[in-house]
Image: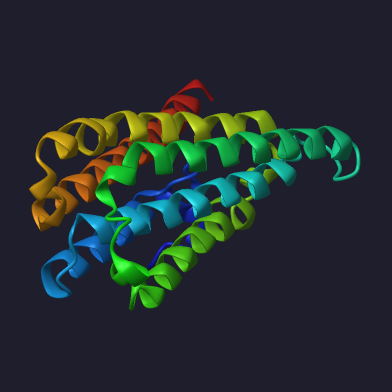
Amino acid sequence: MKAELHDKPWFNTPTMHPFWMGVIGFLVNLFGLFFLGWKLETVVWLLWFEVIFIVGASLIRAFFALQGQPFLNTLLMRVFWTGAGAFLGIAFIMLTVTFTINGIDMARKGNSSMVGLQPQIIVLFLNYLAGLVLNYFANGSFKTAHPAGELMKTFVYLLVLLAIIMPITMHLLPKFPAWSDSKWVGLAVASAKFLVDMGLSWAGSTKEVQVSNQN
């Protein structure tokens, strides 16, 4: 018999980024790089949108993190954490732009690398929305989650992601400007994000196993 959704390991794993979200995001980039003629610039544009979606999802997670209590009992504290997370999230979005701006040709008129990206942006948005709905609300994780914990997981994830991507965009590109037109450098950035996503998913799975063993 097929297992019900609530019996699936990926559904019950307490991670903000289940493995299938990282796979979908990586496939979007792979398809663009090898079939749509994308270069690094387009990958960076999509990365900016993904960071916005990640921050937005973390704020929703923080606001609805009930800590095992009724909705109104911790409302003020959740409003505080969500507001603080919004300020920090904006800072991380700006930091992402600063660390990856070398991959964007700002002199190019009309930002042609953004043309035709609407379908991919919608797919990525639906990807993060599905992760939020399935792996936070539908499986009941929000009932015991802590707002500070949800924000911390997100910002640690972004720090690790930026630390891995920064050597490419901040150090290599200024030395080798021609690489900005290479799809292989775009693939390197997309692969770096995929590895961080898989690491986060693995960390959540490991935590779930440890909790199960303790119980």
Query: Picture coordinates of residue 34 (x, y %)?
Result: 11, 68
Q: Is residue 165 above or below residue 126?
A: above
Answer with left or right where residue 34 lies relative to residue 138: left
Quarter of the image for residue 137 reads bottom right
Q: Is residue 91 visible?
A: yes
Q: Nearer the viewer, residue 101 or 142?
A: 101
* Residue 63 spot, x, y in % from top left: 73, 44
Q: Position of residue 72 (x, y in %)?
A: 90, 43
Residue placed at 30% from the left, 42% from the top? 198
Give the left or right position of residue 147, taking residue 105 as reference.
right
Tell which of 39 and 148 is nearer to you. Answer: 39
Q: Name the residue at 36% across, 71% down.
A: 110
User: At 61% across and 58% down in the image, what residue appears?
Assistant: 138
Q: Which of 19/106 is in front? A: 106
| Residue drawn where x is 10% and y is 48% of the image | 179
Colour option used:
rainbow
Quadrant for the N terminus in the image: bottom left
Q: Is residue 145 visible?
A: no
